[in-house]
Amino acid sequence: MHRERISENVFWFQSEVYAQVTAGVVAGPQWAVVIDTLALPDETLGMREFIEHELGVPVRYVINTHYHADHAWGNCFFPGATVVAHARCRDLLDERGKPSLESARKQNPALRQVKIVLPHLTFDSGELNLRVGKKNLTIVPVPGHSHDGIAVLVEEDRVLFAGDAFMPLPYIVDGDVDDIVSSIKKIGRMGLENIVQGHGDIILRGEIDAAVKENLTYLSNIKKFAKAAARRKSDGDVEPAGIEESGKSRVYLGGLADALHKRNIQTLVKRAREE
């Protein structure tokens, strides 16, 4: 697992195991806030070890940016912490997370020690604020990747933990393309120093405008392609243009980018036909 200090008492973690998924920690003098967990128990436990032994504080809050397994299944490794999320995240973890975990356990023995912990503190509109030492965290809705997406802004440092609302390749299969466009535009107007993407590397201030523009261009292009494909073909698979032809620079994401891109296209074509 990679780890980096972004600013004073603000840290970033990135998985070396699955899809470059990320998580964060904001530490105060008495306790810390974890923003998302990682895909497998060993890496989430490694985060906890760093917080408790290197930073010397317990974890009081865990914020889930959305309900997906690689961001929320590690809640159980912070016993006693209050889990914070969007109200829809709680519903989705209960409705989808629990059966998904039962199925995944059969394929991956490492998940046997995982159990779903539902959020204790939720909100469904507006903003939520949390003070950690000298840092003020503002939690805001950013739907689109999923319907329960939230982001966490560290106000003093202008660092945004964006969850999967901002990724090297936008992914909308479990969400809505128009919502994610709105969320990305919102993020682009926030005057940030850094964006911590839900997957991939940290985006620095001088790179933010280009990253926002590129993601919006990609989404516009695949939406146009899907509408044209829906009119052109009534059935069968649709072979999309490649990622780079759709307006994105080369994307790695642990080798998953091409598969995610194809699922984006298939989803948009299906929705366009239904409309």
Image (cartoon, rainbow, N blue to C red):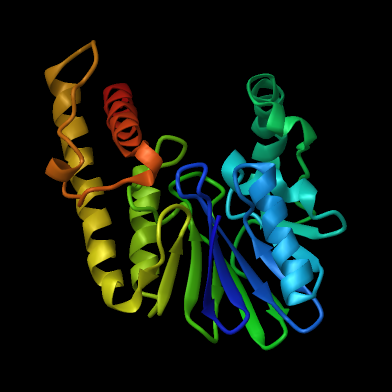
Q: Quadrant of residue 113?
A: top right
Residue 130 lies, in percent from the top left, at: 70, 75
| Relative vertical location of residue 19 with respect to residue 272 in this rendering, above or below | below
Q: Residue at x 64, y 68 (%)?
A: 25
Image position of 215 (left or right of 51): left
Where, quadrant-wise, is the N terminus in this rendering? bottom right
Furthest residue toward top: 235
Q: Position of residue 123 (x, y in %)?
A: 68, 59
Q: Please, which residue is most extreme toward the right here?
A: 80
What residue appears at the point 71 percent right and 80 percent down from the top-left corner?
131
Quarter the C terminus occupies: top left
* 206 and 2: which is toward the camera: 2
Camera-side residue of 240 and 11 = 11
Residue 189, above or below 117:
below
Q: Is residue 151 visible to us here?
A: no
Seen at 68% across and 39% down, the residue is 93
Work out whether residue 170 or residue 207 is closer to the camera in this orientation and state it. Answer: 207
Q: How many marks?
A: 0
Left/right of residue 47 with respect to residue 216 in the rendered view:
right
Q: Left or right? Give the position of 122 relative to 126.
A: right
x%, y% of residue 137?
A: 62, 76
Residue 84 visible in the picture: yes
Horizontal and vertical percent position of residue 75: 74, 49
